[in-house]
Amino acid sequence: MSRPEHEVADIIRIFDQRFIEKHQPNSYQLRVLRALLSCRTPALGGHIHRCDKCGFESISYNSCRNRHCPKCQNTRQAFWVEDRMLSAYPVRHYHIVFTLPEVLNEICMLDSKWFYNHMFSSVWEVIYSFGYNHFAVESGAICILHTWGQNLSLHPHIHCIVPAVGHTFNGRFKNIVKSGRYLFPVVQLSLKFRGVFMAGIKSRLSEQKVIPEYLPQIKQAWNKPWVVYSEPSLGNAEHVVGYLGQYTHRVAITNHRLVSIDNEHVKFTLKDYRDNGQQKTTTLTGVEFLRRFCMHILPPGFVKIRYFGIYSSRFRSTLLKDRIIVRLSPKETVAERINRLLGFDISRCPCCKLGKLVPMGIIPRSRSPTITVHFVA
């Protein structure tokens, strides 16, 4: 994929001061914005390489490695997908998405960390209870939190991949045989999820003694139809992990969706799912763009990919015994793994296409335009 013309870093560079003055983001959000702004720039330092064939010199700046950065996720995603192949069950899997009504967004913003943790616990409670009630097994799930919609609005939802196998109470694995298209009844899933989630919300607001202020939102949420989206079986483990890999390391918006940036506005593309997924464009002011982007900066230390039941760590020893594991060669470097998984040789000379780039020097981190190079002996 070609390098995009515009980047989120450009938006931060143009609008950060106006955004800070108007919305006063917290210190952690500012740290994230600074990390994205400095990603692959002299501020983070880098390395100098020289081709052993043609003598071409290349400078590569370090990545910020922040999980909210649009430029730092492809390699992580490829590595994650391959690692998950080691623990995927060779059975059918189902994709289930738990979403919340928009009316609860205001409650979410009160304490997003608690709110998202409660989402995870509610989702697993529902999946666990359905596995027990319908098949007398402990099921499992890999769950991934997303917080955004296509227009960067707040839209918390959790993607779940659930295997058609469970662990019985006498210690055996049991395949779940389904004649229908779906693993669990979708309508019952929705009703159960609403009951479990809203019970926790009311309890939390009661503890904080603010429930009278949010009674209208609670009543509206109860009266709205909750939708749990479910797909038919996805197939074998390879298909499942590849499919799930599309969701794991996504960020609120990628650089390739940015169409144009000027001194006041940002224009970007989106899919309108109310219009059969048609590709459209929308425009926001730069300050509003950053406000929405910062809504999706997760709290520090928050884990957005979680493993439950038979996919949790307590079952890993069983998986290692029951399955043939294809392990990576311990001699494989990161560059070799990137080349194997992504088909991109980062050590190949971009000029002559024949030589290898050999490390020649290190560029230290620098806040000033002046860069001091420490050469390798």
Image (cartoon, helix red, strand yellow):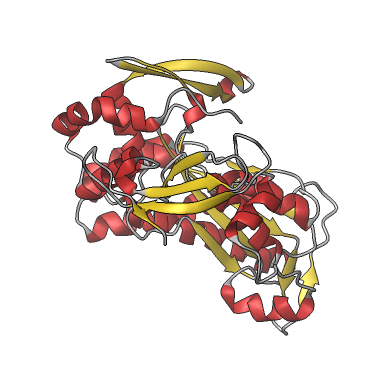
**Looking at this rendering, what residue extends furthest in the left direction?**
21
Residue at the spot x=41%, y=53% of the render? Answer: 361
Residue at the spot x=66%, y=38% of the render? Answer: 353
Measuring from the top left, give residue 151's x and y in whole percent: 44, 26
Q: Is residue 321 above or below residue 88?
A: below
Q: Is residue 122 above or below residue 70?
A: below
Residue at the spot x=70%, y=49% of the render? Answer: 242
Can residue 241 be seen here? yes
Residue 371: quadrant of the picture: top left
Measuring from the top left, give residue 47's x and y in whole percent: 43, 49
Q: In which quarter of the image is the N terminus?
A: top right
Q: In this view, does 200 lie to the left or right of 163?
A: left
Q: Nearer the viewer, residue 90 or 180?
A: 90
Q: Nearer the viewer, residue 180 or 377?
A: 377
**Looking at this rendering, what residue extends furthest in the bottom direction?**
170
Measuring from the top left, give residue 374's x and y in whole percent: 33, 55
Q: Nearer the viewer, residue 21 or 144?
A: 21
Q: In which quarter of the image is the C terminus?
A: bottom left
Q: Is residue 333 above or below residue 145?
A: below
